[in-house]
Each structure stands twice: as structure tokens, then as C-alpha cells.
């Protein structure tokens, strides 16, 4: 159920019960415990109760638990992560999978980002590079301050076992590559489909080749 919420979308409790393969009453009991623990929040919309992760830190924790457990980030009865999930997915509000790790690596390699521990910094030259991509870094910084969140931090990718970019800048980057139609969301899923235009653009702009 938690994995179904990992892309940040609020989902109705009934849908989460189906995702978990349990009865509505069992799902409700588990969700109530998660609410009490501060992992998820509930919102009422008419007759339905919608559940969402409380913040991106919980999504990062899920990724870390999946990595530590050597699982596919879902029920252990599943045979393994689909190739599409490994290639590109949303991790709460940022890009993950091979695409997320490769793009983060490219931004480090070209000097757009520097890394100190688990924190990324945007270089002076990187501000111009992000502007060329259509990201207003000043606006992203302002939003990060207002929301009390990191501008750019490392999130350990469970399938690649390397860092990808999270934080306010990670969110802005995912929103931008979706707006550019480099990736497309799959309805009802956190999987992202790499488009042909995106494949060409990532290769041309960042030297990232995803096959």
C-alpha cells in the first residue's frame, strides 16, 4: 500500500486495499496505524477517504528499505521489478531509476551540481544551465525556503544503488522533463515512459543514452 503512494498521489483507501491484496477492514487497520505513526495522512472527499504520504522523506525511506531488503519495492511475492520501473519512475515528486541516476550524474559531470555528503549545490554556471533547460532556479530556491525543504539532496535509488536528485530542484526537474514530453506518466502508476523525443534530447543535451 505504501509503495502505491510513493509517487505522491493521494489514493482512496479502497484502491489501496486492492493494491495490498487485503480486505477493506484489514487495510483500514493498517492505514490507521500508519496515520498514528505519522507516515501517511488522510483526507475526506465525500464518502471516500483518501490517503497520501506525509512527505517526501517517507518515500525516501521506502526506497532505502527496498534497497536494504533487496526487494522490488513492493510485496516479496512479486517476481522482480519490471524493466520500465527500473528505467524511469517517480520517487514521490522526483525522477528515479536509471534515468534519474544518469541525469543526476550528467549534471554533476558538467558542473551544474556539486555534491557535499548528501546535499547537492547548484554552481554559478549551473544556474545558467538550468535556465537554458527552462528551470527558474531563483523561484525554486524561494519555494524551498517557503516550504522549509531542501533545495537539492541525494536520494539513494533502490534499483540502481546510486544517488538521484531529490528536493525542490528534483521536483522542478521532473516537472520540466514531463512538460517537454521527454517522459510521459503512465495512468495509475508511478512508471514513466521515456519518449523518442526524450531519448534524443537526453543524448544531445546531457550525453545520457538510455536504451
Image (cartoon, rainbow, N blue to C red):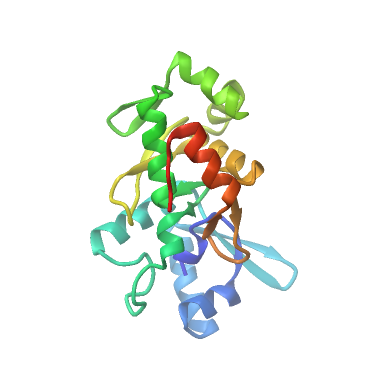
Between 130 and 13, the residue placed more toward the observer is: 130
> Where's residue 150, x and y in %?
45, 32
> Where's residue 30, x and y in %?
45, 73
Between 50 and 73, the residue placed more toward the observer is: 73
At a point 42% along the width and 30% down the height, the residue shown is: 107
Above or below 117: residue 88: below
Left or right of 7 in this view: 64: left
> Where's residue 100, x and y in %?
43, 45
Q: Is residue 110 visible to the viewer in this orientation of the structure? A: yes
Q: Quadrant of residue 85?
A: bottom left
Left or right of 51 in this view: 33: left
Left or right of 84 in this view: 42: right
Above or below 112: residue 42: below
Q: Is residue 142 visible to the viewer in this orientation of the structure? A: no
Q: State the residue lying farthest toward the bottom.
A: 23
Left or right of 78 in this view: 54: right
> Where's residue 81, x and y in %?
38, 67
Above or below 51: residue 204: above
Q: Quadrant of residue 164?
A: top left
At a point 34% along the width and 77% down the height, the residue shown is: 79
At a point 52% along the width and 22% down the height, the residue shown is: 129
Q: How many marks?
A: 0
Between 132 and 149, the residue placed more toward the observer is: 132
At a point 51% along the width and 85% down the height, the residue shown is: 23
Q: State the residue lying farthest toward the right.
A: 46
Amino acid at each position: 500500500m505504501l509503495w502505491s503512494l510513493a509517487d505522491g498521489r493521494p489514493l482512496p483507501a479502497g484502491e489501496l486495499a486492492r493494491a495490498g491484496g487485503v480486505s477493506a477492514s484489514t487495510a483500514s487497520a493498517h492505514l490507521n496505524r500508519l496515520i498514528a505513526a505519522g507516515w501517511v495522512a488522510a483526507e475526506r472527499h465525500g464518502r471516500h477517504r483518501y490517503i497520501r504520504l506525509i512527505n517526501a522523506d517517507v518515500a525516501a525511506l521506502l526506497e532505502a528499505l527496498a534497497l536494504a531488503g533487496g526487494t522490488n519495492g513492493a510485496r516479496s511475492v512479486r517476481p522482480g521489478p519490471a524493466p520500465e520501473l527500473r528505467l524511469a519512475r517517480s520517487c514521490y515528486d522526483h525522477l528515479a531509476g536509471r534515468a534519474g541516476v544518469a541525469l543526476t550524474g550528467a549534471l554533476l559531470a558538467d558542473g551544474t551540481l556539486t555534491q557535499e555528503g548528501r546535499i547537492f549545490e547548484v554552481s554559478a554556471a549551473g544556474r545558467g544551465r538550468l535556465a537554458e533547460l527552462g528551470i527558474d532556479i531563483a523561484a525554486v530556491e524561494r519555494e524551498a525556503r517557503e516550504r522549509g525543504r531542501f533545495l537539492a539532496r541525494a536520494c539513494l535509488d533502490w534499483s540502481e544503488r546510486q544517488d538521484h536528485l531529490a528536493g525542490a530542484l528534483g521536483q522542478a526537474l521532473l516537472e520540466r522533463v514531463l512538460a517537454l514530453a521527454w517522459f510521459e506518466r503512465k495512468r495509475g502508476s508511478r512508471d514513466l515512459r521515456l519518449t523518442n523525443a526524450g531519448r534524443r534530447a537526453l543524448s544531445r543535451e546531457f550525453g545520457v543514452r538510455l536504451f
